[in-house]
């Protein structure tokens, strides 16, 4: 009986640990946004905690994007500029992070950290960007075009090298020119001199 109770307590402890791990690792369903590539995505901060804002910060996968303090200029990092992101500075728009023409590079976990009169608040979003139906990613198109071209160039180079090696190892046979018979030209005087000799020869 004691072994059975110990077995149950171990199983109960393991179940609790697994539940805690899943709660930490898996984001809540309400914070997941799935959009098609090319669409505009708007992520907002927590509406219950914006009053009396002292500092607001947006991050993507832990990378700093924007910092904002009331009465001060908005600070945007190079990463935010590279990803073509904007941030609203209006409380009525919940200091939203705006991504126009979202692409696969924009996928990730976004966090809005706020320091207000009431404390420190946080709002998290998981953004999923899917490709348009029937549209191939740019990387696949580049590979589909580039690979055949590279293969063709390699084939041509190998063919040229092999042909050159074959010619070096087996030089073409020398072509023998046929001997030309010597043509003898005679002048009219030589013919006249030889004519009596020819007549004698024929008479015999």
Image (cartoon, rainbow, N blue to C red):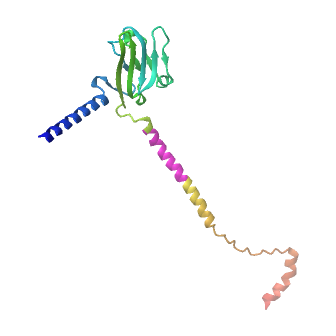
Res 168 visible: yes
User: Residue 97: x and y, percent?
Assistant: 40, 18
What is the residue that sits farthest to the front in this orientation? 2
What's drawn in magenta, residue-wise?
140-156
Most foreground residue, 53 or 173: 53
Figure quadrant of the C terminus: bottom right
Judge from the rendering whether residue 178 lies leftward or rightward of residue 91; answer left or right.
right
User: Residue 55: x and y, percent?
Assistant: 43, 13
Q: How many marks?
A: 0
Figure quadrant of the N terminus: top left
User: Residue 88: x and y, percent?
Assistant: 42, 14
Most foreground residue, 117 or 88: 117
Based on the picture, tell me whether residue 149 belongs to the magenta stretch.
yes
Based on the picture, tell me whether residue 155 belongs to the magenta stretch.
yes
Give me the residue at 13% from left, 40% from top.
2
Is the magenta region chiefly helix, strand or loop? Answer: helix
Give me the residue at 47% from left, 42% from top.
145
User: Residue 47: x and y, percent?
Assistant: 33, 13
Q: Image quadrant of residue 196?
A: bottom right
Give me the residue at 35% from left, 23% from top.
125
Most foreground residue, 65 or 107: 65
Give me the residue at 42% from left, 20% from top.
58
Judge from the rendering whether residue 149 lies leftward or rightward of residue 178; answer left or right.
left
What is the residue that sits farthest to the bottom in this orientation? 204
Q: In this view, does 108 lie above or below 194?
A: above
């Amino acid at each position: 009986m004691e072994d059975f109770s110990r077995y149950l307590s171990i199983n109960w402890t393991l179940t609790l640990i697994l539940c805690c791990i899943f709660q930490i690792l898996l984001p809540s369903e309400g914070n997941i946004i799935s959009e098609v590539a090319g669409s505009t995505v708007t992520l907002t901060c927590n509406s219950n905690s914006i009053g009396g804002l002292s500092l607001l910060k947006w991050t993507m996968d832990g990378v700093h994007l924007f910092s904002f303090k009331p009465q001060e200029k908005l600070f945007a990092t190079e990463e935010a500029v590279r990803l073509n992101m904007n941030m609203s500075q209006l409380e009525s728009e919940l200091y939203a992070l705006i991504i126009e023409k979202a692409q696969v590079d924009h996928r990730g976990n976004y966090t809005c950290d706020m320091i207000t009169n009431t404390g420190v608040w946080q709002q998290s979003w998981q953004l999923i960007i899917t490709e348009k139906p029937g549209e191939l990613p740019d990387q696949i198109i580049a590979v589909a075009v580039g690979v055949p071209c590279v293969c063709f160039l390699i084939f041509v180079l190998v063919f040229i090298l092999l042909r050159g090696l074959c010619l070096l190892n087996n030089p073409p046979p020398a072509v023998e020119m046929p001997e030309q018979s010597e043509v003898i030209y005679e002048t009219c005087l030589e013919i006249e001199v030889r004519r009596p000799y020819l007549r004698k020869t024929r008479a015999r």
